Amino acid sequence: MAETIGSLLEKTRIAKGLTPEQVTAKTRISANFIRAVEADRFDDLPGEVVIRGFLKTYATLLGLDPVDLLTRYDAMGITTVDKSPELISIPLQESPLGPKVTLYGGVSLALIVTVAVYWFFGSPPPPPPPVAVTTPAPTMAPVEESPLDQETTPEEAPP
């Protein structure tokens, strides 16, 4: 008898020294779902798409060929009932103020934001105020007259 998908996965997991909890930590697949796959209890899983995703992720983690594993799963001819929750459609709520007020409010807000952005980023900055630069006139230090600078007359000249 050929080896089942579940027994192949379980045997490979044990050979790699992994527990179902360690597989859960690495793949984010519930440990209960890991045990269900290894026991070939595919009816305990949420649905066909989820089963295929689990098998692909689990096979990749264990180093097995996911395409080969999915081919083996398809060959089993298992039909599962989709147990995934249905999406709930919530009707859109209209504004209590009415569509025109909402439209005008949105247009006004867009206009205000546009003007504010232009004012902040678009207008050039004002020129800096002129600065008066005054330089003091150079001053000369008073010079004392030396005795040599004085004029001497021939009568005063030394002999």
Image: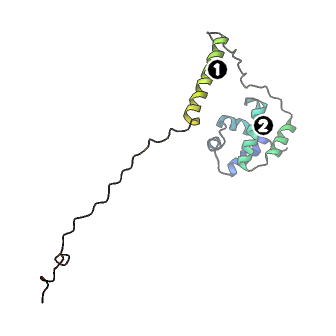
Question: Residue 38: where, in percent of width, then height?
Answer: 73, 39
Q: For residue 54, what is the image quadrant? A: top right
For the point 21% across and 68% down, the residue is: 143
Quarter-wise, where is residue 107 in the image?
top right
| Residue at disc 2, secondary structure | helix
Circle 1: element type: helix
> How far apart, in angstroms, are the residues tagged by discs 2 and 1?
48 Å
Residues 58 and 138: in front is: 138
- The residue lying toward the viewer, choosing from 153 and 97, is 153
**Could you tell me which residue is drawn at 79 percent across and 45 percent down?**
66
Is residue 39 at least partly visible in the picture?
Answer: no
Residue 111 at x, y = what percent? 62, 24
Label 2 vs label 1, nearer the camera: 1
Q: Nearer the viewer, residue 84 or 16?
A: 84
The quadrant of the image that shows the C terminus is bottom left
Q: Amino acid at mark 2?
A: Arg
Visible in this render: residue 28? yes
Q: Residues within 10 Å of mark 1 (few under 14, many from 20)?
A: few
Question: Is residue 148 placed above or below 132 in the rendered structure?
Answer: below
Instruction: Write the residue at 71% across / 18% down.
Output: 89
Question: Measured from the top left, where is residue 142 in percent x and y?
Answer: 22, 65
In the rendering, which numbered label is found on residue 142? none
Q: Which residue is mark 2?
A: 52
- Please name whichever residue, 2 or 54, is drawn nearer the observer in this view of the structure: 54
Badge 2 or badge 1: first in the primary sequence:
2
> How far across and down, in percent of the image, does residue 129 sit?
44, 41
As drawn, 13 above or below 42? below
Q: Is residue 129 above or below residue 96?
A: below
Q: Amino acid at mark 1?
A: Val
The type of colouring in the image is: rainbow
The residue singled out by tag 1 in the image is 107
Badge 2 local density, few (<14 within 10 Å), some, or many (20+)? some
